[in-house]
Image (spheres, grey):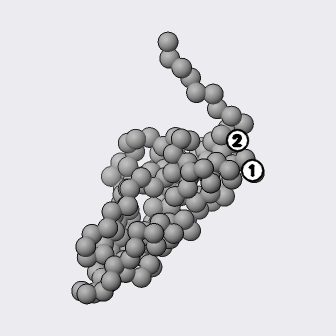
């Protein structure tokens, strides 16, 4: 017997907000399977690279325009890797492939991380596995949902 997860009222409101407008989104909002966004420049040799905490703080300034929760706390950022030369690679997902802001959020993430002192070139790659779920949200994001 399979167990179905019961979705509470807050999760239903979040899901509604995130999928609202999908039917009216332009065809360009569905992004290709291997989509990447790029920003930044090569970090000059010898320059101190940014801390992981500074990169995460930058990611927390990017918000899904449909809900008041940043992409990091929403659980859209799966992995942040930083090379010795300061380059940063980020794996992130979207709540759904047809997300109306599919082409915007990854580029916003790349742009804000590239502004962090000590960051070189930034690549944000969209990944679809594992699929995003409410379980990926931080406790802070869940608390925000209770206030909505």
Answer whether labels 2 and 1 touch (C-beta < 8 Å): yes
Q: Nearer the viewer, residue 13 or 134?
A: 134
Of pointers 2 and 1, the one earlier in the residue sequence: 2
Mark linked to residue 148: 1
Q: Is residue 46 left or right of residue 20?
A: left
Q: Residue at x 61, y 44 (%)?
A: 19
Dot 2 surroundings within 10 Å: few (below 14), some, or many (20 or more)?
A: some
Callout 2: SS: helix
Q: Nearer the viewer, residue 36 or 141?
A: 141
Point out residue 13 in the picture as x, y percentages from the top left corner. 70, 42
Q: Is residue 100 left or right of residue 143?
A: left
Dot 1 surroundings within 10 Å: few (below 14), some, or many (20 or more)?
A: few
Q: Residue at x 44, y 40 (%)?
A: 131
Point out residue 37 in the picture as x, y percentages from the top left corner. 38, 64
Pointer 2 residue: 10
Residue 3 appears in which quarter of the rendering?
A: top right
Q: Nearer the viewer, residue 101 or 138?
A: 138
Point out residue 112 in the picture as x, y percentages from the top left corner. 48, 73
Q: CA distance from mark 2 to mark 1?
A: 8 Å
Callout 1: SS: loop
Q: How many marks?
A: 2
Point out residue 26 in the picture as x, y percentages from the top left corner. 54, 53
Q: Is residue 63 above or below residue 121?
A: above
Q: Is residue 105 above or below residue 114?
A: above
Q: Residue at x 30, y 72 (%)?
A: 87
Q: Residue at x 65, y 54 (%)?
A: 67
Whether residue 68 is visible to the viewer of this picture, yes or no, is yes
């Amino acid at each position: 017997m399979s167990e179905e997860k019961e979705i509470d009222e807050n999760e239903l409101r979040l899901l509604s907000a995130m999928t609202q407008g999908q039917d009216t989104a332009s065809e360009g909002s569905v992004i290709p399977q291997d989509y990447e966004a790029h920003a930044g420049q090569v970090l000059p040799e010898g320059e101190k690279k940014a801390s992981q905490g500074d990169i995460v703080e930058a990611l927390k300034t990017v918000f899904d325009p449909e809900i008041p929760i940043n992409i990091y706390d929403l659980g859209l950022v799966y992995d942040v890797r930083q090379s010795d030369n300061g380059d940063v690679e980020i794996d992130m997902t979207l709540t759904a492939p047809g997300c109306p802001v599919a082409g915007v959020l990854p580029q916003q993430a790349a742009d804000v991380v590239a502004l962090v002192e000590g960051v070189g070139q930034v690549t944000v790659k969209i990944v679809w596995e594992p699929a995003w779920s409410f379980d990926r949200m931080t406790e802070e994001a869940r608390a925000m949902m209770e206030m909505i």
